[in-house]
Image (cartoon, helix red, strand yellow):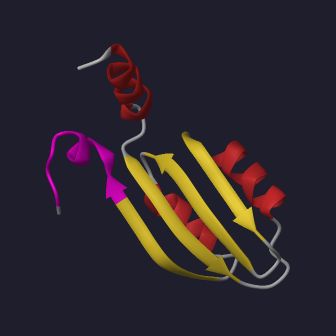
């Protein structure tokens, strides 16, 4: 294993779940959503992009259910993917 691979593994191992979803709603504001995530959730690699009707979320966290609960208050959530990065790094699937 190269040093860069080890550094990347350590960086991501703090937060276990890669959480991704789409939020469809009205008057969505990606800046407000990003600020809420920063203030209320522990995690990294936050991506909240879109427009006032559709936002894509990508976030690494240990508590993906909190992310889903919050996002559901903003509109309809769908295309939800929660991947266990720890299992992936060990070569386990499912």
Q: Would you say residue 35 sits in the magenta stretch? A: no
Q: Position of residue 12 (x, y in %)?
A: 41, 34
Q: Residue at x 50, y 63 (%)?
A: 20
For residue 72, say whether it is visible. Answer: no
Q: Position of residue 6 (x, y in %)?
A: 32, 20
In-image side of 56 versus 83 (left or right): right
Question: Where 69 falls versus 93 (above or below)?
Answer: below
Residue with the most extreme front position: 2
Question: Where 79 falls versus 21 (above or below)?
Answer: below
Q: Which residues are magenta?
A: 83-93
For residue 14, say whether it is visible. Answer: yes
Q: Residue at x 63, y 68 (%)?
A: 56
Q: Residue at x 23, y 20 (%)?
A: 1
Q: Residue at x 42, y 52 (%)?
A: 18
In-image side of 46 versus 31 (left or right): left
Q: Would you say residue 84 sits in the magenta stretch? A: yes
Q: Position of residue 23 (x, y in %)?
A: 63, 76
Q: Position of residue 94 (x, y in %)?
A: 17, 63
């Amino acid at each position: 294993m190269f040093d860069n691979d080890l550094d990347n593994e350590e960086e991501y191992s703090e937060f276990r779940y890669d959480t991704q979803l789409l939020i469809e709603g009205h008057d969505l504001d990606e800046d407000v959503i990003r600020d809420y995530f920063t203030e209320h959730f522990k995690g990294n690699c936050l991506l909240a992009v879109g427009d006032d009707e559709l936002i894509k979320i990508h976030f690494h966290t240990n508590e993906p259910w909190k992310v889903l609960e919050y996002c559901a208050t903003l509109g309809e959530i769908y295309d939800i993917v929660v991947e266990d990065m720890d299992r992936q790094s060990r070569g386990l699937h499912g």
